[in-house]
Structures are given as C-alpha cells and as structure tokens.
Amino acid sequence: MKRLAKEIYQELILVLKGKTLDTLLPPIVFILSLNWFDLSIAIIISLSLSVLLWLYRALKHDNQKYAIFGLLAVSIASIFALLNNNPSTYFIPDILGSGLTFIIALLSLIFNKPLAAYVSHFTRGWPLEWFWRKDVIPAYKEVTWLWLFYFMLRTVVETVLFLSNSIDQLVWFNTFIGFPLLIFVLTVSYIYGIWRLRKLNGPGVDEFIENKEPPYKGQTRGF
C-alpha cells in the first residue's frame, strides 16, 4: 500500500509539476487572492505571477508554451472580469475550457481515439501505435469516460453558479472542489488504468517498442 501511494504521488507530480503548473497556478492564486484583496489587486497578483513564470522559463531556456498559455488565459479572464467589474466573469474562460474539454473527450470516444491516450502520449512520449492496440485501448477509453463525467459535472456546476451570479460559491467550488476533485480523478484514473491494463494482458510500452512476443509481462508502471 505504501509503495502504491508513493507511485501515485510520483505519477501526479509527473503530470502536474513544472511546466503544467505554469498554467494551473495563476488562476488558483487569483481565487485565493480574492479572499484578502479586491478584484483589481487579485488580477494584478495573478498577472504578475504569470509574467514571472514566463520570464523564469525564458531565462532557463525551458519550453515556454505552458507559461505563455497561462499568461494568455489569465489576461483574457482578467479582461472579462474588469469589463464587467465582476469577479465571477473571471471564470468565463475556465467554464468555456471545461466545456470544450468535455466536447473533446466526447468526440475522442466517438472516433475511438480516447483523450486519455493522447494526454499520456504527450506527457510521456510513448508511441501512439501502442495506445491503439486492442489489448490496450479499452483502458484509455474507460478512463476517458471518467474524465468526460468530471468535466460535464464541472461545466454544469460552474455554469449554474455563474448564471446565478453566486461569486462566493463559484470561488468556493473552484478552490475546494474543482482542483482537489481533479487530483482525485487523476488518482482514480491511474489506479484503475494500471489495473485494467494488467487485466487486458497486453504488452507494456517497453515490450511493444522492443517487438516482444507474448506472453507479456505487461505495463507495470505508468499509465
């Protein structure tokens, strides 16, 4: 159990660390800042953080796309909030993003190219051909269904709260439900995904790359 917990922690860090946090941190900081400051100050803090993250990546010669995306997202959200002088409008891009992710997940299932497979491919660099095997793809389809329900729930709740102008509830939902629930969904996805891959008896990524013949050892780490 201790080994599994450590493995899950390391996998979450792989997905969420560094460059990915360049996109996630500024909105979280904005939400937290609203608890102590007014709208203008919260926007300045989140924008400043986005700029600092971008400069940090640039100075380190790292991939800057996540930092740039985060800066653009925060800038657009800030414009929405300032034009309407309403903190709730800051979350319009987030609502649209959740809805778009829901649509992408749905389309990926319709076309039998599950979103979870693409996310894993871009995160880990594993060959796409492995994901499309009949003894591998069901695991990624089933996990994508979980993501579909998560983003559907998030989109519906955020939209209802936004339309009712329930800013306190919207901030509360994003701070204490949205992100923590995402961590929970990712954790369940990993545990279920690894279990499902083993049940499918397909090759692990390394075995696939090395063109090994069955019986396979299977995927023992990473999803």
Image: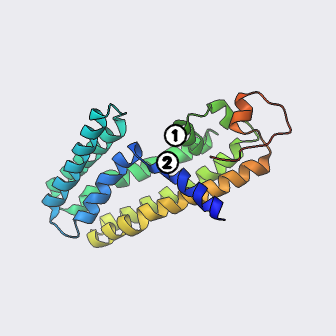
Which quarter of the picture shows residue 92?
Answer: bottom left
Tell me if residue 97 comes above or below residue 55 in the rendering. below
Q: Which residue is mark 1?
A: 123
- The image's mark for residue 88 is none
Residue 223, image x and y in percent? 62, 46
Q: Earlier in the sequence, mark 2 or mark 1?
A: 2
Residue occupying image coordinates x 31% and y 65%: 163
Residue type at the position of mark 1: Thr
One can see residue 132 in this view: no
Q: Quadrant of the N terminus?
A: bottom right
Within 10 Å of disc 2 (Cα), the crowding (few <14, some 14-19, many 20+) is some
SS for tag 2? helix
Callout 2–callout 1 Cβ contact below 8 Å: yes
Residue type at the position of mark 2: Val
Residue occupying image coordinates x 19% and y 55%: 45
Residue that protrudes farthest toward the right in the picture? 215
- The image's mark for residue 15 is 2
Residue 127, image x and y in percent? 62, 31
Within 10 Å of disc 1 (Cα), the crowding (few <14, some 14-19, many 20+) is few
Q: CA distance from mark 2 to mark 1?
A: 7 Å
Residue occupying image coordinates x 25% and y 46%: 50
Tell me if 137 is positioned left or right of 88 in this view: right
One can see residue 46 in this view: yes
Residue 184, image x and y in percent? 53, 62
Residue occupying image coordinates x 22% and y 43%: 51
SS for tag 1? helix
Tell me if residue 19 comes above or below residue 28 in the rendering. above
Q: Relative to the observer, which residue lies in front, 7 or 67?
A: 7
Which quarter of the picture shows residue 125?
Answer: top right
Which quarter of the picture shows residue 69?
Answer: top left
Label tally: 2
Residue 88, image x and y in percent? 25, 62
